[in-house]
Amino acid sequence: MSTISNHLPTAELQALDAAHHMHPFTTNDDLTAKGVRVIARAKGVYLTDTDGNEILDAMAGLWCVNLGYGRPEMGQVAARQMNELPYYNTFFQTTHVPGIALAKELADLAPGDLNHVFFAGSGSEANDTNLRMVRTYWAELGKPEKSHVISRKNAYHGSSMGSGSLGGMTYIHEQGGMPIPGIHHIGQPDWWSEGGDMTREDFGLARARELEEKILELGAENVAAFIGEPVQGAGGVIIPPSTYWPEIQRICRKHDVLLIADEVICGFGRTGNWFGAQTFDIIPDIMTVAKGLSSGYAPIGASIVNDKVAKVINACEFSHGYTYSGHPVCAAVALENLRIMHEENMLDHIRNVAAPALQNALSALEDHPLVGETARSGMMASIALTPHKESRAAFASPKGDVGYMCREHCFANNLVMRHVGDRMVISPPLVITPEEIEVFATRARKALDATYADLKDKDML
Ligand code: PMP
């Protein structure tokens, strides 16, 4: 029986953590030298650490705690399901009520004829499912060579071998032999950093047409699918120009290439609609979901698949699945999450209350000398830091140094705001109130001021 608890001194917990716990996406030795923060509990939009600091979590954990922390109904549902049926698989001619009910609920929520659900334990696993599913789809139709998948630079789709390969982050590809063969990456629709003299709309079209160029280069008969996040999240909350997604959809349809929308962040209200695909007015063939599906209270992901693809996959044995595919406790928690979202009219709250308040806060920050642009879709947003607004210039220091400084000042001011390069990213719990958004804005400005002062001191402007 472990004697380790929140009551131990923080230094002792830090030492134990350093001795035994390997953190993801972290240089663990640096973290040991610095001292990790130990989060003890959380309620609403606030985290409390073992030193008693109350930290406003403007990232909803990892873009997932959409309902906010500490919702008692979620724990009650999990306990009830654990007592009734803690586990059973769906591999061998069996199913269970939470799995049935969640699949039906997702089919009802999803746009178009996306009526079929394949469960996974995470976003990475769901994207691995998608990769195998689209290749199997074409193979079953007698076109096994139609197997290449096109994604985008700076995309994030997970960190397993398949999903990490679908992602377009070079620092991930540099470790462990990625990308696996048959995956290609085109340019991202990031007008601020890469749009040059083009208008946003022209740039959006140009980037979408890179897809057509890549399809023609590979031969449409060899291309299975295109995958993209409606709004790139981990890439820095890159909101594509309005011209981008309709053109991507047109090109996919023209060349008979399946369209996969990775809704792991955008799904379940984040962009102000149930799904990002609806915000950008497209109907994909497959959607990847996770995170907000359970508000992060239980690990669950899924691929939501349209009739066309499901008809082919359901006619063969798709030799794929995970022990925890459709885990009954996770499915029950996800159902409760969706029930609460409906009951509390979460989309109305986002559209009429939270998103306008976030927009006001962001607009007010635009006068800050470091803020180049702010960008927002629903309740995901970013702040581009720049030494020179008009030219959209990048800092002379290595990319990310200034963003990191700002993130550290946020933390020092009890605010979690993450940085991606020199872009600050924001994705708070969807339940956040206008008053809490004001707290966010005050702390964000303090962090920006402190970053500006640092840059002046170090002659970095
Ligand atoms: N897709 C997207 C768009 C994501 O943002 C993430 C996680 N940040 C993933 C997939 C991977 O999800 P997971 O971490 O649950 O494997």
Image: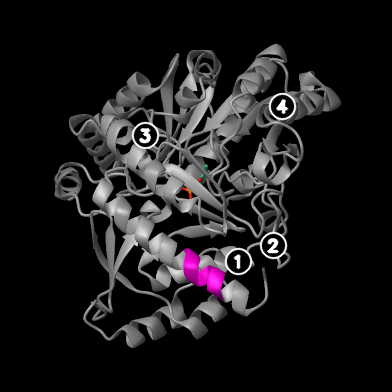
Q: Are marks 2 and 3 in contact (CB under 8 Å)?
A: no
Q: Amino acid at mark 2?
A: Phe
- Tell me the element at label 4: helix
Which residue is label 3 attached to? Answer: 269
Tell me the amino acid under the disc marked 1: Val
Q: Is residue 140 left or right of residue 119?
A: right
Q: Distance of mark 4 from mark 2, alpha carbons?
A: 26 Å
Q: Quadrant of residue 3?
A: bottom left
SS assignment for the magenta stretch, majority: helix
**Mark 4 to mark 1 CA distance (whole Å):** 30 Å
Helix, strand or loop at label 1? It is helix
Residue at the image point whose x is 36% and y is 38% from the top:
355
Q: Which residue is mark 1?
A: 402
- Of the residues shown, which amino acid type is indicated by label 4? Asp
Which residue bears the numbered disc 2? 395
Q: Position of residue 263 (x, y in %)?
A: 48, 35
